[in-house]
Structure formats: structure tokens, C-alpha cells
Amino acid sequence: MRISELSTKSGVAIPTIKYYLREGLLHQGEQTAATRAEYDESHLRRLRLIRALLEVGRLPVASIKKIIEAVEDESLPIHLMLGTAHYALSAAVEPEPGEEWQIARDQVDLLISDQGWDVSPAAPARDELAQTIVRMRQLGLPVDLKPYVEVAQKLVSEVEMDTIPFHGPRDAAVEALVLGTVLYGKAFEALRRMAQESESARRLSP
């Protein structure tokens, strides 16, 4: 297909497609003339991935480039490729000085160990959870994460990971991970708020 058709099918404007081509986010089409190239389904998949990373993941172009490099590196195992995308989605957290932070980080490490989870020591989620625990303690909230751990494990192992096409195109696997992580996360938060409203009404309404 020509770039005009690629634009129509993907919903991405031609100038934007040309920008992605210049930046190396989108691989070049097959050159059929000096000013003409042909594109295929792999370009559509890549545009879907870029849009997911930009519009849903809210990632900067520099982070997207790292993910695209991981997608294109066929020698990189799927697990590490998905990890590149996962880490890019994580909030940047700076460890805080003081004993509170170390206690919280130790609790996170123990939680991971107790669950038997295989999580890299460099995983940003470790510090993200540690920061959350510090804030919970500072605000006097109970730090009992066991019910949340159980729900997270059940959701991931029985539902979420089954939506990722591990044996399909690498672009599609990363896109599914990004969309699932962000959108299902938002859906879960909305469901929690509605459940809280309903339970408040059940307990407190006359």
C-alpha cells in the first residue's frame, strides 16, 4: 500500500508517518521509485504500537525509541522485550534518605521473596511501591498489602497475561502489554471507586 493508504488505514496523518520514518520509529517501506515506497501490514502494526505508547502510555519519544529497538532486536527474548516496555511505563522514583525508606524497601523485597516472584532488583516498581508504603505510614494508614497481592496475582496469572500474543508479532505483544497495563489498570480503579460507593451506601445509608 502507498503512504496515503497507510495513513487512511492507520488513522495517522501522512506528515506524522513521515516524522516517525525520519526518527526511526517506523521502518522504511519498500522503495518502488525515487519518491515512492510500498508499505504492508507490519507498518500498520508498528503504527498501532507507536500510538499505544504515545496516546495510552504517554511515553516520550526517547522512551518509545528504546522500546522499538527492543522490538526489532530479534536476539532479545520476549520477556526482556516486554520488560523494556514495562519499565518505561513505570513512574520514576528517587530513593529517599532515611530509615523510613529502607524499612519500606526491605518490606517490598520481603513481599517479593515470600510470593516467590521473579522480579529484577532493578525493577522500578520496587521503588514505586516502597514510596507508596512510606506515604501510607506517614499518614497513619495500615500497611497490610496481602489482600492486594492476592488480587494482583490472580488477575495477572489467570486473566491479563493470557491477553498477550507471546507467539505473534513482537509489536503486537508489546502493544497488548501497554494497553492492558494502562487501560485495565484504569478500569480496575474505576471499579474500586464504584464498589466503595456501593459499600458505603450499604453500611451507612438508613
Image (cartoon, grey):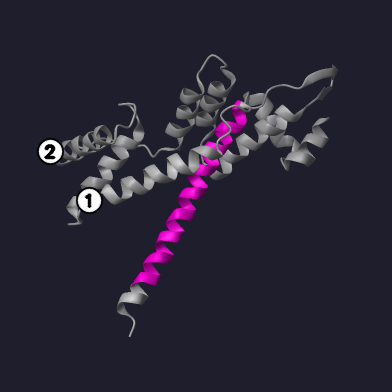
Asked whether the viewer can see residue 31, the reply is yes
Say which element carries label 1.
Answer: loop
Residue 188 percent coordinates (x, y): 45, 54
Using a 10 Å C-alpha cutoff, classify the residue at mark 1 as few (fewer than 14 neighbours), some (14 to 19) or many (20 or more).
Answer: few
Residue located beneath label 1 in the image: 144
Residue 121 in the image: above or below residue 200: above
Residue located beneath label 2 in the image: 99
Q: Which residues are magenta?
A: 170-199
Task: Determine the residue positioned at 19% across, 35% down.
Answer: 106
Whether the magenta-drawn stretch holds residue 196 is answered as yes
Q: Nearer the viewer, residue 96 or 86?
A: 86
Total residue callouts: 2
Residue 74 percent coordinates (x, y): 57, 16
Task: Determine the residue positioned at 20% across, 40% down.
Answer: 104
Q: Amino acid at mark 1?
A: Asp
Residue 116 in the image: above or below residue 152: above
| Image-quadrant location for residue 26 | top right
